[in-house]
Image (spheres, helix red, strand yellow):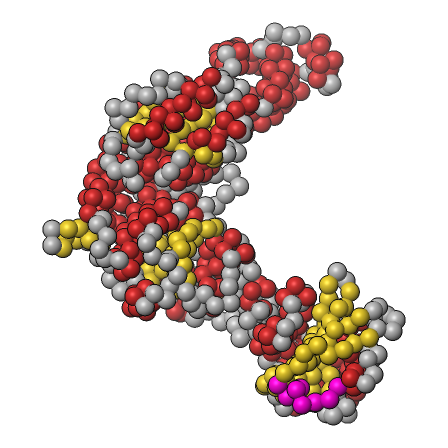
Amino acid sequence: IVASEPYGVIENASRWLRMDGEKPADPSNPISIAGQIIQLDATAAGNLAGITRLAYDGTELPVREDEITTADITTRDIDRGDAPHFLLKEIQEAPASVHKTLRGRIIEVDDELRVQLGSEVIPDRIQNAFKSKQIKRIIGIGQGTAAVAARTIPQFLSPLLKDHEVLVEAQLATELSGFSMATDMSDTLVIAVSQSGTTTDTNRTVDLIRQRGGHVIAIVNRRGSDLTDKSHGVLYTSDGRDVEMSVASTKAFYAQVVASIILSSAIADLIDETRDQNEILHALRQLPKSMEQVIATRSAVATAAQRHAPQKRYWAVVGNGPNRIAANEIRIKLSELCYKAIPEDGTEDKKHIDLSSEPLIFVCAAGLSGSNIDDVAKEVAIYRAHKAVPIVVASENESRFEAAAELLTVPQLHPALDFILATIVGHLFGYEAALAIDSQALPLRQMRATVESIIAEGTLEDGAFERLQSDLATPGSQFLDGLRGSAYDGHLEASTAAKVVTVLRYALGVASLDSYQIEVGKVGRPGVVIDDLNAALTKAIDELTRPVDAIKHQAKTVTVGISRSDETLLQSTLAKAALNAGTPRDRLSYRELRTLVALDASVAEVTGWTRYRIEGDVGEEATIQVIDRGGIASGIASRTDTNPILRGGKHRAAFEKEIMVGVGSDGRSIVHIPEVKDGQTTGLTLLHCRFHDYLPTPSMRAVLQGYRGRYGALQDAVTESHPSFRDDMLSTIKVVDLLTRPVYVLAEHWTS
């Protein structure tokens, strides 16, 4: 069975092999081709013998028995039970998931509550790094919903560490890996949040952090996932096997938030154990019960969603303080479930942005008090005055939101935790809104079923068109009534509605078929009208359909994402040597970095370096002068000291703007690295290298493939006069010769 993930096919297959499109065919060579091709033999189905795995370059990648994973879930875990959708089932299971996450992790010590996490979560090396004040920066990362949950870390931990020199922040994993990396990150703890543990963007960032000496703790649900293997410590949410089937993640979010809070509490204790966290830990223990109370108010949430969601085309979500976390998460779920692009803003900032659209505004205001709630109430009044529809979520017994179109209340638990309860209301609102929008397609589906039954007959018998008119009357009337009452304003495109109404008039017999060609541009025959109505209804149904558990253009597990391949290339020996010599990072192209990585295997040692500045047009008479040198080059005189004209191998490398291996007049092997800016060569770095004498055939082939296309050129030179090219000969020729001598001279080794 071939599937995107094992959950959907667990009833038929409990063992699985993961395809890895990022892993190089040769792990020792990071620029070797990635990607896998798997051939399946049906005659050997169910056995390893039936699987043949190849790299894109044809290299065979044998499948080992230890690569086969046995799923840790059963059909019981993915049973929807009596729930109409997995999403609703998972929202209802959220309190239990939070309870499992907390279980055994909050203990009583001397009449005070403390968080207890083992060394499997915070390893000794990280504990010691905190105690020695080595860690100066804590960053929560993730993507999508997990990134929102990661924002809980600075929200909760920053106040606890305000008297200590530790910076706490949250970033998207892609933002951290793209713009906030440092060469040495040994002073950084990254807390990576992920539901599946297979999110490529997050996992790739973790790889880069570890390469730079950073510490990593993962908050993840799936045991045995990729992220758990990459992290120093792991805090499992729920019991580490709490399955979510709906693409829109809900219960995982609550567990991630709670896990972030208890991990933050444990870290705060490591840095300053005098902090009193008794009150919030007591509240955490009560959280599952409060969540159940909110879920019990589903009918009130459904009424609000049905009353407002279908009619409003523009939506927004706002919050302030901890409620910004709730607003951000609700924005994601409303967008996913209802197929809308929804902004998320600060409550007080909304009046400066887009009230002109008169949107439905979902206001997260749980846990507020004093002047904060007074100000939010004023903002809600401003929204309403500008014809927006504010739906407010506030703590129970709150009476300051008279201007709200709807007021939905949650229990008052703790100001730092009440945003979690607001999020539940948002998730329920998204679910009920999606159902309300989807239900609008019911009369359209009824009409299409009638039309398709006639199409299925193959021929249009006498009287069939008249019967169609009768069968379409009731659902057609329902649709037209809704259209006149503005029920479809929010989600049905005007052009689609116009098309349905136009064709429906003829199908109902309201308009004469004689006018069809004038209005539609086609000859007015019953068969034409039926086909056009079927097409128009299908388009309208598609615009209104909200499947809830599945989401258009989106998958449950996103296994594609960033590569940050240049970050890997910068770790090669030659690239590091060039940068250490002073070569500016922005003067090394991606192509040059790949070439340096390819040459890495051929170099035994970098013994020195010389940097030159080039002035003038390298196509004419440019000049070159030494600006710095080191290592063995410090004691070597340069021709340019007496004759600054750019010529010889240096000129060739600068002119071609490509890395070139050469042998100097003194017999020393060197690598020329041109520094290019805006298409002009402005400098040159020479690395003095000692090359290996010989390399094994696979390694030498990879070097030649990555260096100026020499492998292909050598093949062509040999096969010009010889029937075949023997790769094994590569291991018998000196490395420097293969890199520097003309290919037609090297070809003689094969033809002689």
**In the foreground, 464 or 620:** 620
Question: Is residue 637 one of those drawn in magenta?
Answer: yes
Where residue 35 sits in the image (x, y, percent)?
56, 63
Q: Quadrant of the rendered structure where residue 460 is?
A: top right
Q: Quadrant of the rendered structure where residue 727 is?
A: bottom right
**In the foreground, 263 or 631:** 631
Quick one: quadrant of the C terminus? bottom right
Could you tell me how many numbered marks the image carries?
0
Question: Is residue 163 one of those drawn in magenta?
Answer: no
Q: In screen coordinates, is 361 left or right of 32? A: left
Q: Quadrant of the rendered structure where residue 526 is?
A: top right
Q: Is residue 382 above or below residue 50?
A: above
Where residue 688 sits in the image (x, y, percent)?
66, 84
Segment tinted magenta in the rendering: 631-638
**In the foreground, 638 or 592:** 638
Residue at coordinates 30% horizontally, 29% vertically from top-left? 370
Where residue 533 sits in the image (x, y, percent)?
60, 20
**In the foreground, 477 or 315:** 315
Q: In screen coordinates, is 308 left or right of 626? A: left
Where residue 548 sits in the image (x, y, percent)?
42, 34
Quick one: quadrant of the N terminus? bottom left
Q: Residue 584: in sight, yes or no?
A: yes
Residue at coordinates 54% horizontally, 29% vertically from top-left? 353
Q: In screen coordinates, is 277 left or right of 318? A: left
